[in-house]
Image (tube, helix red, strand yellow):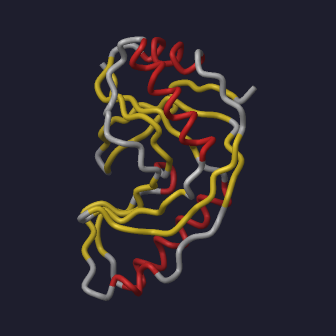
């Protein structure tokens, strides 16, 4: 069994924007588990414990991927998780809907929560200042999505380690 998820991996410009924001937050006094740069990604479908990554890859291959753009859009919090958002985007939403349908049709389990595109920047965040301070300087950046990856996550001694298991390229 492997702990799997399907994700978009970011280019250097997006990673730079996100890590700059994390650094800024640290200076402002945010404490918590900051997501390491190599783990920053946009989850499209969380599968969880599953023994057959090839079946997931086959389902992914059944969904044509045309390249599309994504753009960073604001920051926010879910309880003690601080995140950066992705601008609402029909191409992204449509791809995720078709991808999740292909997973369901192939009896591959996944987390059915509504897709809410965000990038987790800090887990178990603590901050005593004003949220306005944190939200006033959102990261800027956009990229062309040309591939989607299937990732495995394993617990290492310093947190989660994400490894690309396979992927699909835009046609």
Q: Identify whether 133 is placed above or below 22.
A: below
Q: How many marks?
A: 0
Residue 54: x %, y % from top left: 48, 13
Frontmost residue, 31 versus 169:
169
Q: What quarter of the picture does the C terminus occupy?
A: top right
Frontmost residue, 108 versus 94:
94
Look at 57% across and 33% down and name the residue there: 95
Q: Quadrant of residue 120?
A: bottom left
Residue 38: x %, y % from top left: 51, 50
Outermost right residue: 171
Q: Quadrant of residue 132?
A: bottom left
Q: Identify whether 2 is placed above or below 35.
A: above
Q: What quarter of the picture does the N terminus occupy?
A: top left
Residue 168: x %, y % from top left: 63, 25
Q: Identify whether 18 is placed above or below 25.
A: above
Task: Say left or right for 144 vs 58.
Answer: right
Look at 57% across and 58% down and name the residue there: 87
Task: Say left or right for 79 vs 137.
Answer: left
Residue 24: x %, y % from top left: 48, 79
Look at 46% across and 49% down and name the residue there: 39
Frontmost residue, 47 versus 15:
47
Look at 25% across and 74% down and name the residue there: 126
């Amino acid at each position: 069994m492997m702990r799997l998820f399907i994700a978009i991996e970011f280019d250097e410009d997006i990673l730079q924007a996100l890590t700059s924001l994390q650094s800024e937050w640290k200076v402002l006094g945010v404490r918590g588990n900051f997501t390491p740069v190599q783990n920053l990604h946009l989850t499209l479908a969380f599968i969880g414990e599953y023994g057959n990554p090839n079946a997931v890859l086959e389902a992914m291959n059944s969904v044509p991927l045309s390249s599309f753009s994504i753009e960073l859009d604001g920051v926010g919090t879910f309880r003690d998780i601080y995140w950066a958002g992705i601008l609402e985007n029909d191409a992204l939403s449509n791809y995720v809907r078709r991808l999740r349908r292909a997973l369901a049709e192939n009896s591959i389990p996944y987390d059915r929560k509504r897709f809410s595109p965000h990038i987790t920047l800090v887990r178990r965040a603590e901050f005593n200042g004003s949220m306005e301070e944190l939200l006033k300087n959102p990261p800027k950046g956009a990229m062309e999505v040309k591939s989607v990856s299937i990732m495995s996550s394993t617990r290492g001694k310093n947190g989660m380690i994400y490894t690309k298991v396979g992927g699909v390229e835009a046609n």
